[in-house]
Amino acid sequence: MSTAAIRRLVGCAAPLVLCGCVAAMPAPARAIPGTGGGSGGTMSVAEETAEVARLVNEHRVRAGCRALVWDEAAARAAQAHSDDMARRNYFSHTSPEGRTMVDRLRAQGAPAYRLVGENIATGQPNAREAVRSWLGSTGHRQNIENCGFTRHGVGLSAGRWTHVFYTPLQ
């Protein structure tokens, strides 16, 4: 994606649906391997997704929430969604067939939950910019600062970021 392209991101939480959409002009920055964000990037996708988790938890603690626990089912659901959006060139919480974050979590074996949310973004060149974009948007920020969430996972593919949050029933 060129530096003149528009970045988009969307945040959503359920059972209450909190969705928001913002557009921002991207700033030049180093690339993430596999994102098409330029040249010279050195962080792997695994490092970038771990950095999102670290930055989000750092922010949550400052906001008075507990840090989220990394959850493999949430991470698999997030990665599968980022991969699907990249492979089929769409950007939405809902797949072309109508699959939602709830469907993706169930498919990855997540336990029953009482709260679930998802932030997505596209075009941000690195974890810091993805988190900065989310924090600059009311709906995304609400997901990040929702102290009711306890678990999360992050996915990244070809510049499409997915951050899944949830809280199991038990």
Image: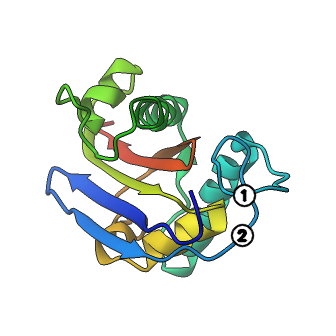
Percent position of residue 148, x then y: 34, 59
Percent position of residue 82, x then y: 47, 38
Q: Quadrant of residue 55?
A: bottom right
Residue at the image point whose x is 56% and y is 56% from the top: 1
- Asked if labels 2 and 1 touch by Cβ distance under 8 angstroms, the answer is yes
Front residue (pair 88, 156): 88
Report the coloring of the rendering. rainbow
- Which numbered disc covers residue 29? 2
Residue 60 seen by the camera: no
Is 56 situated above or below 24? above
Residue 127 seen by the camera: yes
Q: Secondary structure at mark 1?
A: loop
Q: Quadrant of residue 24?
A: bottom left
Q: Secondary structure at mark 2?
A: loop
- Judged left or right of residue 138, residue 80 is right
Percent position of residue 125, x then y: 64, 61
| Badge 1 or badge 2: first in the primary sequence | 2
Label 1 sits on residue: 38
Residue at the image point whose x is 41% and y is 21% from the top: 108
- Judged left or right of residue 4, residue 104 is left
Is 71 situated above or below 120? above
- Which numbered disc covers residue 72? none
Is 74 situated above or below 22? above
The residue type indicated by label 2 comes to Ala
Q: Quadrant of residue 131?
A: bottom right
Residue at the image point whose x is 68% and y is 73% from the top: 28
Dot 2 alpha-carbon crowd within 10 angstroms: few under 14, some 14 to 19, many 20 or more: some
**Rounded to the nearest whole Å, what is the CA distance between mark 1 and mark 2?**
7 Å
